[in-house]
Image: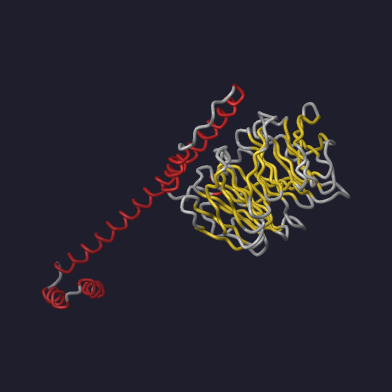
Amino acid sequence: MFASASESLSYHKWCNNDLENYFIFTEENKGKYVNFSWSHDNTYIAVVQENEKPIILSSRDKTNMHHVHTVQVLDNVTNLAFKNHTKKIIAFGNSHGDVCIYNTKKRDVETKIPNLKTPINSLEYSVDDQQLAILNDQKLILYNTENYNQDLSQLFHKSLCTTMKFHPIMPNQCAVGCLNGNVVFWDIYTSVKLRHYQKHSNKVTGVAMTSCGKQLLSGGLDYKICLIDNLMGDCVFRMNLHQPVTTMDLSPDDKLIAIGTEDGSVYLYDMRNYLQPIYRRKVHNTAVNKIKFEHGFVGNHEVLNFRKSSISMGSEKEAELLAIPKIPPPTVQKNEIFEQIKRDLMKSLKLQMDDLEGQLIQHCSKFQNFLDNEFDSLHESLKCKWDIFSGDGAQLMQALNCGDTNKSCTTLNKKK
């Protein structure tokens, strides 16, 4: 399941080969929904509308989302992000360059980051919650959430930074999309650019990485979605849509791509067969500003038939998932976070093993059918030749003279 934000906040459920608008939330006489963020257990969703205070909705019952709390601490909020492992902490950023970290339990500001002077374009926590990443002007700013007195780290770009995404497992890797069409892949621990891609001719509006780190997705206002091989640096597949891409997200199980466009349409692609969308519909009346899957979303294998992936991808993915860089020694609180990461990793490995099992069964079935067909063909051929030898002498001499057994078989069968 995932949500999309435009003139309304829509919650979508993929079921029976169709996407249901499971629930639509809207408030009368208020602006468009510009951003939202799920809590770690998907029971709450923080939402912001144009020129309005952020609100927190209860999403325990997806058919009856309701208002819980209005956050009054910051005006002109444009971006927000829940921490990944708690629903008590949300980061807010506004158009004036203010960023604050809000405690939902105390309903008060926990800490405030010095004013950055220019609008906040994006906020996101790393998977271990140790870093809060802030996109501001041409900078990726990193705020250490465990050392409030530490200076902000800044990674500079040649163009305005428009979107970003942390790696879903590796906390040191972050991809940043820019106004000039560039995508920069950073190691935030060492401040080193791991990759630099120029795959778009216009503003990049969405980036995402697969759990194995092998593939990176990017979308932009140039109507394109690029699937990039992160090892080779090549764009292995490019989708050209009919509208500019305004937002996109990849499901946590790496199997679905959700895309929002300027005309309010929502596309859904299967990562194992991305030549055609498995769903496309105009859901909103205006541009889709944000689209995001729930945490821990797992696709329905029977409905979406996701067992058609290649065997090579599964084995490579498992190998690369195990090659996670070492992280500095954790505290007691970090241990809990890493245990959760470990559980998520094992779930991902199990999912890949299930895929491999399904592929093996499918290939064995195809091989059995192939053998059956070959034996049937051989049997028919031998039977035909035996019929020739069991016929009269004239037919045998005719077959030997023409050297065409198949033709002789045909003639013999006609005479019979």
Image height of 213 relative to 180, above or below: above
Q: Is residue 260 left or right of residue 349?
A: right
| Observer-nearest of 110 and 251 | 110
Q: Position of residue 396 (x, y in %)?
A: 13, 73
Q: Split into 4 quadrants, where in the image is the N terminus? A: top right
Q: Position of residue 10 (x, y in %)?
A: 74, 48
Q: Residue placed farthest to the front in the image?
A: 151
The residue nearer to you, when weighing 135 against 360, is: 135
User: Residue 326 in the image: x percent, y percent?
Assistant: 50, 32
Q: Residue furthest top?
A: 332
How many tags in the picture? 0
Query: In the rendered view of the protein, which quadrant contains the C terminus?
Result: bottom left
**Position above or below: 181 against 312:** below
In the image, 363: left or right of 250? Answer: left
For image coordinates 84% across by 42% down, the residue present is 75
The color scheme shown is secondary structure
Q: Position of residue 378 (x, y in %)?
A: 24, 60
Give whichever of 15, 155 is nearer the camera.
155
Q: Residue at x 50, y 50 (%)?
A: 230
Q: Is residue 122 left or right of residue 210?
A: right
Please give the name of the residue rendered at 55% of the width and 44% of the height, measured from the top-left corner. 192
